[in-house]
Amino acid sequence: MKRIYLLLLFAIFLNASLRAQEEVYTFSLDEAVEYALQNNYTVRTAGLDINSAEKQKWEATAFGLPQLDANIDYNQWLKQQVTFLPSEIVGGPPGEFTPVIFGTQQNMTATATLNQLIFDGSYLVGLQSAKTFLKISNLAKEKTDQTIREAVINAYGNVLVAQETLEILYKNKEVLEKNLNETRILFENGFAEEQDFEQQQITLSNINNDINRSSRLELIAKQALNLTLGIPIETQTELTESLENLALKSTDMQMLYQEFDLENHVDFRIADNQVLSDELLVKYEKSKNIPSINAFVNYSTFQYANNLVFFENPEDNWFTSSLLGISMKIPVFSSLQRNARTQQAKISLMQSEIKRTEISENLKLQVSTAKNKYQFALDQFQTSKENLALAESIAGKEQIKFFEGLSTSIDLTNTQNQLFGSQQSYIQSILEIIQSKVELENALNLF
């Protein structure tokens, strides 16, 4: 019976494993982006960074709140220390010493101390710094989301390009196989030369190689998309968008006239917060020249005994004490050490201000470059689309002329290669639209 039970458990586990392996994820582009923003490995790490920053903020806050510590100490002399007293104190002859033992063999002390920071300039600056660090962590998460969104769109587009390329290659293969069969018939009946048949074989062989290569590229593209989504790369993933539909969704002429809000851009806000962080560092170094005040209250209870009687008659055997104190630490002279640290902080502040200016100008350049690139991609897409239509028309006419004996196999091959190149240019132009649009969205910070 036990063996049957174990076999049943194994069968259930195996079935669950197979179902997990066969699980298929289906995504539109928007669904893929949304999924990645929740499950991508980098996004999840950035989320944990925010949690860590929140804990650090509380750690900085708690430093200025009451701190209570307690200690319990127990000591037992294995061999008590001997002290020598002048013998005349105990009635002995002058000039001699008598060994005596002071204290008891055992003692126990329990102490509780409450500390409270009253004033410390560095603590106030530290609170501001903790808030700034949390803000920087949130901005880093926002930047990560932006980067992952772009990566998902590009990876999604790469998969569609690979699939579209394969589909076109298979269609071209069908046409070439048909041409090859017809050319063989013409050759066998003396209406075509052998080189015409051989030329068609070369073209077909090249197409087969392209299909094999594109199949491997499709697999790699899907694995890259899975990695970006945050799922195992072996997972079966199906995309519901088509390449041309994605191209239409990515065509938005209004983006070329979109105003750029520099101060709202995540990169500028990160740089601006770095300046704020360095300003706080300057304040922190200056605060070290200000006195700090702390207060404490202490309560202790202790007992001495030669035997283990600590908990017998506690009202008689335990002695208590309490102490209240306030301390002020006044920085007087540090051989210009504090001044040197303040000057270093000021230099860091100037560097971060220069960096912020540089980032501002780079962001403006990125917007200008991205708009030009997007405009070119739109123009190139239109040109590629028109060229593809022309190449298809030319290839069709040349094919008719070849089988009517009005052109050579070389002419047919050249027009076919021209068609294949136009097909690839068209597909690539769609990918350029998708990639340049998301690049412009990132430059404009449109999310």
Image (cartoon, rainbow, N blue to C red):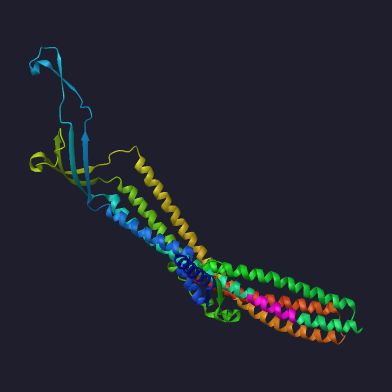
* Residue 296 visible (yes or no): yes
Q: Residue at x 23, y 47 (%)?
A: 69
Was residue 393 drawn as part of the magenta stretch in this picture? Answer: no
Q: Which quadrant of the structure image shows residue 384? A: bottom right
Left or right: residue 88 compared with residue 182:
left
* Residue 376 visible (yes or no): no
Q: Position of residue 303 (x, y in %)?
A: 14, 38
Q: Which quadrant of the structure image shows residue 385? A: bottom right
Considering only vertical position in the picture, is 226 above or below 413?
above
Q: How many marks?
A: 0
Q: Residue at x 88, y 76 (%)?
A: 195
Q: Which quadrant of the structure image shows residue 439? A: bottom right
Front residue of this view, candidates 417 and 385: 417
Q: Please give the range of residues in magenta.
A: 163-174
Q: Position of residue 76 (x, y in %)?
A: 21, 33
Q: Residue at x 38, y 56 (%)?
A: 277
- The chief SS type of the magenta part is helix
Left or right: residue 174 compared with residue 120:
right
Residue lying farthest front?
A: 1
Q: Position of residue 140 (x, y in %)?
A: 44, 62
Was residue 166 drawn as part of the magenta stretch in this picture? Answer: yes
Front residue of this view, candidates 443 and 357: 443
Left or right: residue 286 compared with residue 38:
left
Q: Position of residue 106 (x, y in %)?
A: 18, 34
* Quadrant in the picture for the N terminus: bottom left
Front residue of this view, candidates 133 and 122: 133
Front residue of this view, candidates 102 and 42: 102
Residue lying farthest right?
A: 190
Q: Residue at x 36, y 51 (%)?
A: 282
Left or right: residue 286 compared with residue 103:
right
